[in-house]
Image (tube, rainbow, N blue to C red):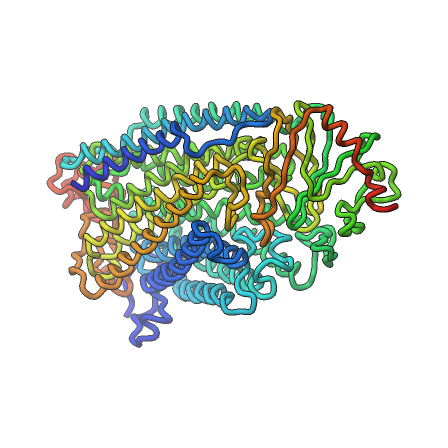
Amino acid sequence: MQRALLAATLVLMVVGAFALALLRPWWFTPLASNWGSIDGIILLSLVLTGLAYAGVNLFLAYSLARYAKGPAQYIPDDPLLERRLFWFTALGIAVLLAPGLYFYAHLVRPPQPKLTVEVLGQQWLWSYRYPGPDGKLGATDTARVSPANPFGLDPKDPAARDDVVVVGGPLRLPLGMPVQLLLRANDVIHAFYVPEFRIKMDAVPGMVTRIWLTPTRLGAFQAVCAEYCGLGHARMLGQVLVVSPQEFQAWLEAQPRAAQALGQ
Amino acid sequence: MELPGYHDHRIGPEPRSFWTRYVFSQDHKVIALQYTVTALLVGAIGMVLSWAMRLELAFPGTLDPGRYYQAMTLHGMIMVIYLLTALLLGGFGNFLIPLMLGARDMAYPFVNMLSYWVYLLSVLVLLASFFVPGGPTGAGWTLYPPQAITRGTPGYDWGILLMLVSLLLFIVAATMGGLNYVTTVLQLRTKGMTLMRMPLAVWGIFVASVMALLAFPALFVGCVMMLLDRTLHTSFFMPAVIQFGQRLPYEGGSPLLWQHLFWYFGHPEVYIVILPAMGLISELVSVHARKPIFGYRAMVLSLVAIAAISFVVWAHHMYTSGMNPYFGFFFATTTLIVAIPSAIKTYNWLLTLWRGKVQLTVPLLFAIAFLNTFVVGGLTGLFLGNVIVDFPLQDTYFVVAHFHMVMGVAAIVAIFGGIYHWYPKATGRMLNETLGRLHFWATFVGTYLIFFPMHFLGLLGMPRRYPTFEGLTFVPPSAHALNEFITAVALLVGLSQLLFGFNLVYSYFRGARAPDNPWRAATLEWQAPTPPPHGNWGPEPPPVVYRWAYEYSPPGFPEDFIPQNAPPVLAGGGAEEGYA
C-alpha cells in the first residue's frame, strides 16, 4: 500500500512539474530586450532537466514497485554502463554549456554603444545620468556627494556641467538602440533589475559596473532592487520608459543641464 | 585497565562520575549525542524563524522589515552552519568514524570534547544576540559589506559583533573536530580496514572534514577583517561611503573582497554539508535494498572529484556582482563539470535499488526523499551555474528554491534517515515506526509543495529578500495566493517535526529494545554491542576486517549479508574473494 503510494507520488511529482511548465501559471514576463537568447537557453535547460528529472523519478518509482520481494541480485559494478553514463552526462552538460557561453560572450562584449547611461543606487532610490551634447559623462567624486548632488559631479568639469541628471524619476530609453548602463552606488550594494529585460547587475560602492541591452518594446516597465540593501529594499522600485528615439531625443534636449540643477 | 588494540593509541579509563560520563565526556559517542541534540534544538529555533518569515510573506504587515531581515539572517546562518554542518560532522562524524573503522575512540578525545564545548559557546553567543539592544543582525546570512556594518541595518550595535564572534568560535570548534576526524581516519583504522574498504559514510565525512579544514580559514580571516572594519574602522571591505548624506570613516576598501572570501568558504561549505549526507544515503540505500552499493570505486572517486572541483567554482555566486565578467567563462565551466560526478552518484544510488530487495523502512523512505530532492536541486543548479542564465535568475525565488532543495531539504532528510537508521545503535531502542512514517510523508510531500513552485516564481522574476511584494506590478495575484499556500504548508511541515521530536524522546524511554544488528547490516558499528560501551569493543581486541562494507546478497551464501569482520572460513570462502 505504502509502496504503491510512494511510487504514485514520485510519478505525480513529475506530472506536476510538467504541468507547471506547460500550463505556465507563473512564467517569464513578456520579453522587452534583445536578450531572448537567455529565454532560449532556459527553455533548452527546462527540456533537458525535465527529461532527466522524469527519467530519475520514474526509474526510482519503477525500482521501488518492481523489486519489493527480491531476491536481490549481486551487482557490485558494471564498468561499461558506468562509462556510458559518464559520457552521456558529459554530453548533456556540453549541450547546455556551449550555447550558454556563446551568448555570454555577447553579454561580455557589447556592440559600440550609441548611448551610455549611468544608474545610481542609494537607499532607497534609483537615479540616472545622461551625457550632454558632448556625449561624455563628466567626472565625479564621492567626496562631493550631497543631497543636491547625489552623483558627486564636479561642477568645474565641462563634461559634467552639461550632463542630464534624473533623481528618482523614470529611466527613459530609446527603442531599438543598444544602451550601456554604468552602475554605481553611494552607500551599500544594490542591483538594478528589470524582469522584462532579463538582465541584472549589482551597483557596488567604490566601483563602476556595467551591463548592456537593446530595448525592443515600447512601454513602461518596473525596475526593482535585487540585492538586499536594508530596510527599504522591497520599496526600492523604479520605472523604465522605453520611448521612440525621436521622443527620447526631444525629451533629453528639453532637460536642464547639471550645472543649472546645481545652481552653479 | 588497558584495552587491547592495533595502534599506539590509549584512551582513558571509563569515567565513573556523572559529570565526566555525560557532561565533560571525552567519549566520541557521548560527544556525538551532545552535538546532535544541540544542533537539533538550535535547528528548531531556525525553523520557528522560518515560520515568522512565512507569516510575513503571506500576511504582509505581520512583522516590520527589520524583524523580517533579522529572522531571515539568523534562519540562514543557523540552518547552514549551526545545524547542518555541526550535525553532519560533529554528530554523525563523531558517532560513525570510530565505530565504522573499528577504533576505540577519536585520535584526540580531549580535543574532541573541547570541540563540542566551543561549539556550544558559539551557539550561546549567537543566541545571546536575541537579547542584546537592537537584537541580532539583519545583514542577510551572507553578511555582505557595506550593508552588514552600516547603521540602519538591524543589529548594527551588537548583533553583528556577536554574529562574527560566534562564527569565529564555530570555526575554532570545527577545526578541532576536523583535525580529529581526519587523523582518526588516517591513523586509527582497524586491522584490514584499508581506505578502499571504508564505508562511504566515512568517506563522505572524511572528505568533507578535509574540505572544512581548507575552506573555513577563508571565512575566519574574513570575519576578523570585518570585525576590524566595524570596530577600528579599517577599510578592508569598505570604500568611501555616503549613507543618508553622511560620510562614513572609510576609504579605499573593496566590498567584492568579502564576497570572494565568503564564497571561497561558502561554496565548499555546500559540499561540506552534502558529502556526508551522500555518504549516509549510500549506507541506507545499500543496507535497505539488501544489495551492494553500485560502483563503490566510482562513488569514492566522485566524492573526491566533487571536493576538488568545489574549490574552483565559488564565483558562480558572483556572476552579477560586478567582478571581471571574463571570470564567468571559467566558473560556468567548472560549475557545470561538478554536475558529472554528482550525476554519477545519483545513477549509482538508483542502480543500487534496481534489482534489489527494496525494504521500505523509514530510513529508506528518507533516502528516497533525498534522491528526489537532491536531483531537483542538482538539475536547477545547471540553470544557475550556466552564467548567462544566472543573469535573470540571480537573487530571485529560483535561487531560494534551488538551494533549499539541494542543501536544505536534501541534507535534512539525509539527517533524518541517518537518525532513524542509527538511533537503535546509539540508544539501544528502536524508534516508533508509525510516527516515523507519518513524519516522512509530512516532510517529503510538504517540503516539495513548499519549494518546487518557488522555481516558477523565480522565472517570473520575483526577487528574494522582500518581506512584501506589494507594489510589484509584474507579480500577478495568483503569486500572492501561492505565497499564502506555501505558508500554510510550511506551518504544517514545521508542526509535523514535533512527531520526530516526540519520537526521539518517547522511544528513548519506551521504545522497543534494539537488537545489536536490527537492519542486518555489514558495517562494523552493527557488530559492536548495543549501545556500544566505553572503548566500543569491550576487553576483546577490536574486530579485524576481511572485506568491503557492502557484501549484501552474495550468491551461493545462505545469509543475505556478510559482516566486514566475519572471517573468510565462517563466511564460506569463495563468494566474496574478489572483494576481500
Q: Is residue A200 above or below residue B538?
A: above
Question: Which of B573 and A264 lies nearest the eye of the viewer?
Answer: A264
Q: Quadrant of the N terminus of chain A?
A: top left
Question: Which of B147 and B186 lies nearest the eye of the viewer?
Answer: B147
Is residue B440 shown left or right of residue A162? left
Q: Quadrant of the C terminus of chain A?
A: top right
**Quarter-wise, where is residue B513 in the image?**
bottom left
> Residue A128, percent across and down?
71, 39
Q: Determine the residue positioned at 36% across, 50% down.
A: B488
Which residue reaches farthest bottom? B17
Q: Is residue B199 visible?
A: no
How many numbered markers are drawn?
0
> Residue A180, percent across and down?
69, 31
Q: Is residue B441 above or below residue A107?
A: below
Question: Which of B419 and B522 lies nearest the eye of the viewer?
Answer: B419
> Residue A196, percent across and down?
56, 31
Q: Determine the residue positioned at 65% across, 32% down.
A: A241
Question: Which of B116 and B106 lies nearest the eye of the viewer?
Answer: B116
Q: Is residue B160 visible?
A: yes
> Residue A179, percent across and down?
69, 28
Q: Determine the residue positioned at 67% across, 27% down.
A: A243
**Quarter-wise, where is residue A157 in the image?**
top right
